[in-house]
Amino acid sequence: MSKATRTRTRSPEPHVADSHDLIRVHGARENNLKDVSVEIPKRRLTVFTGVSGSGKSSLVFSTIAAESQRMINETYSAFLQGFMPTLARPEVDVLDGLTTAIIVDQERMGSDPRSCVGTATDANAMLRILFSRLGQPQIGSPQAFSFNVASISGAGAVKYERGGKTVKERRDFSITGGMCPRCEGRGSVTDFDLSALYDDSKSLNEGALLIPNYTGDSWYGTIFRKSGYLDPDKPIRKYTKREFNDLLYKEQTRIKVEGVNVWYEGLIPRLQKTMLAKDREAMQPHIRAFVDRAVTFTTCPECAGTRLSELARSSKIAGTNIAEACAMEIRDLAEWVRKLDEPSVAPLLGKLLHTLDSFVEIGLGYLSLDRPSGTLSGGEAQRTKMIRHLGSSLTDVTYVFDEPTAGLHPHDIQRMNDLLLRLRDKGNTVLVVEHEPETIAIADHVVDLGPGAGTAGGTVCFEGTVDGLRDSDTITGRHFDDRTTLKETVREPKGALEIRGATAHNLRDVDVDIPLGVLTVITGVAGSGKSSLVHGSIPTGEGVVSIDQTPIRGSRRSNPATYTGVLDPIRKAFAKANGVKPALFSANSEGACPTCNGAGVVYTDLGMMAGVATTCEECEGKRFGASVLEHHLAGRDISEVLAMSVAEAAEFFGSGEARTSAAHKILERMSDVGLGYLRLGQPLTTLSGGERQRLKLATHMGEKGGTYILDEPTTGLHLADVEQLLGLLDRLVDAGKSVIVVEHHQAVMAHADWIVDLGPGAGHDGGQIVFEGTPAELVAARSTLTGQHLAAYVSG
């Protein structure tokens, strides 16, 4: 018998496929990046740090993630690419080693009234299938439980060819939907204050219509006056019943006005389509003011705000209908689903339960599925988007996060860190743009950009480990272990704002006195009721300036000068100095370059490929016509002024021939919030989240008010910028203002004169005042989660 011999072989050389373990970026020049070159390790957690506006998002989102998405899109057919967003190749020399990028950003979810947490995460779709299978009585398919599908039925004749003959048959059809017929699935009904639409003592010719764009000789006003349905010389109060109905409710009808074919429609349906269908925040200020004045939104009396028809609400599982299930807190709904034992729908129950448990795991168990997605904060929206990735079996993909700890209490940050590490440990590359030291500390690799913001940034200041960052002489390294100490003395209040019996959302009959004339911080875990207390109980109106988290919107034509209103006094100063109209100095009006229409660039549409934007040869990107640039103020033309930084412009308009006090005041406020480096004409689309937040703050600081309410003003701010924010808050209080801040940042808590802590938990476990007092008293007591974390912060 031969004995088998075992030969010892040398270990094989590493496979060439295993050598691609880096994402290489060389020569990145997006926005303010200055030929940035970095090598990012794959299957590791890399955190990108730096002051707000230093180029973090330009490198991570606009370069790495954008190129990954563009290359994936190119794998589809030309036909499909025609339906997809066209992406241009980023300004970069070499991008090597990319993997599929999944972006989880802080963009707010759409504020469409039909969008809610359940529809955004597919949980509602699974619930509808569940009720269509198990609900008693059975009423139909899943769409019978959808508030986006209306019930319709009809009958008619159809013709088709069969056996060489034309056959005509009568067919009936019906669709059972779950939409409430009264509110059309919106949950609220609108009611118009007719006195805000027209003055019934006047005729149309006398200017009876009070609606913006319908007054005077406007086109809409002309349609109503010359429609033939209404007597333009008769006062509205003397209209017949038919005329009144035609004015307000007439259905869309084709008519001819001044030789032009147009649609005539009553005021109410026209306003519902043109104004109420829009997002309120996207409206022009005068339109928004009109809507606030003329329209009231009340809960639909037929569906009680559930958006569902009576039929959809009649079908139940274990005594609960779908509206009641969607109104439960998600953690309670998960327990309800867990008790259902139906083998016929076991896979569906398993998937639904996993989704609901993911909400709880990520710290959003206090939400309900019927919560409108437009009411979620930036941090809540980002975590909601993470839900679908938590149970994913994908590996070797790149997850890109934009400040995932935004809006999180220190108690919740550890949970978020664990999730990021879990994604990494499954073999994925995790890229995080972050300012929070607790999250930077868990990084395998750190890339610090700077040294400053805007044109002073855009370079890599440090690349390496967290310990290396601590020892580095960068702004982030120097401030990494910063700790704000508790104040030795706090300001004495000059009165109190009394809140009694607050019950908004999860608040439990809360009574609290918020001191005035001091810096008050409202804190507590996410979902404890902070925003409900501040925005739902403090009356907004005269003397109260509320700055919430809604993002500022703007196109390429919008810039800091137009958003803050500083361009108006600048135009007037130019007009006065040159004896011409102010409109001449607007690139969106009479002063626009005729070739590029004031855009500064000429766009060429290339169909499925990314369009090409080339600098306008006529104005050389200055946006204004040549004749406009001949007008000067103190030796500068309007394009040179828009190219100035805020700091330069503040000096320019602060003294000498160009002295303009109205412009100088606004520019000073922009400098106060740390935006002195921004160019006045820089498009808003190029600003970072932190820069937009501070721009909004600078704008509101000009409003006359005795009480300022700020909602998480540290969002998007670097550790070094927080010091500047604290100085700004102190200046407001020292000027006699009352400042109320909803905040999680321990530095702001330590700097406060008074703290109101809500909790003890989130959702129905919160909504109570668990502490009121000074920061020193909170640290000494350590009776709440906030107290424990603040004590660790000031002692560490």
Image (cartoon, rainbow, N blue to C red):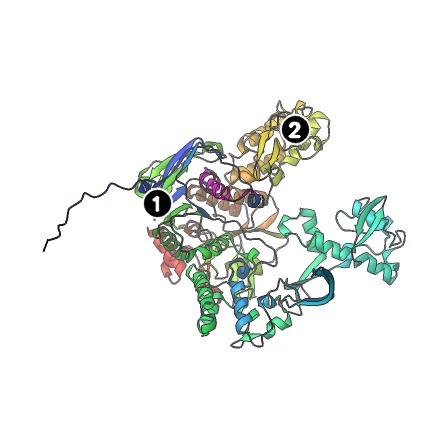
In the image, is residue 71 above or below residue 524? above
Q: Determine which of the numbered discs, if any, sits on residue 481 in the image.
A: 1
Q: Which mark is residue 624?
A: 2
Which SS class for mark 1? Answer: loop
Label the magenta part by its dominant secondary structure.
helix
The residues tagged by marks 2 and 1 sit, at their Cα atoms, a distance apart of 48 Å
Image coords of residue 418 (percent x, y): 36, 55
> Foreground: 342 or 63?
342
The stretch drawn in magenta includes residue 505: no
Nearer to us in this view, 440 or 37: 37
- Res. 795 in view: yes
The magenta span reads 55-78
- The amino acid sitting under disc 2 is Phe
| Residue 456 placement (x, y as % from top left) | 46, 32
Residue in the image at 74% along x and 57% along y: 269
> Alpha-carbon neighbours of circle 2 within 10 Å: few (<14), some, or many (≥20)?
many
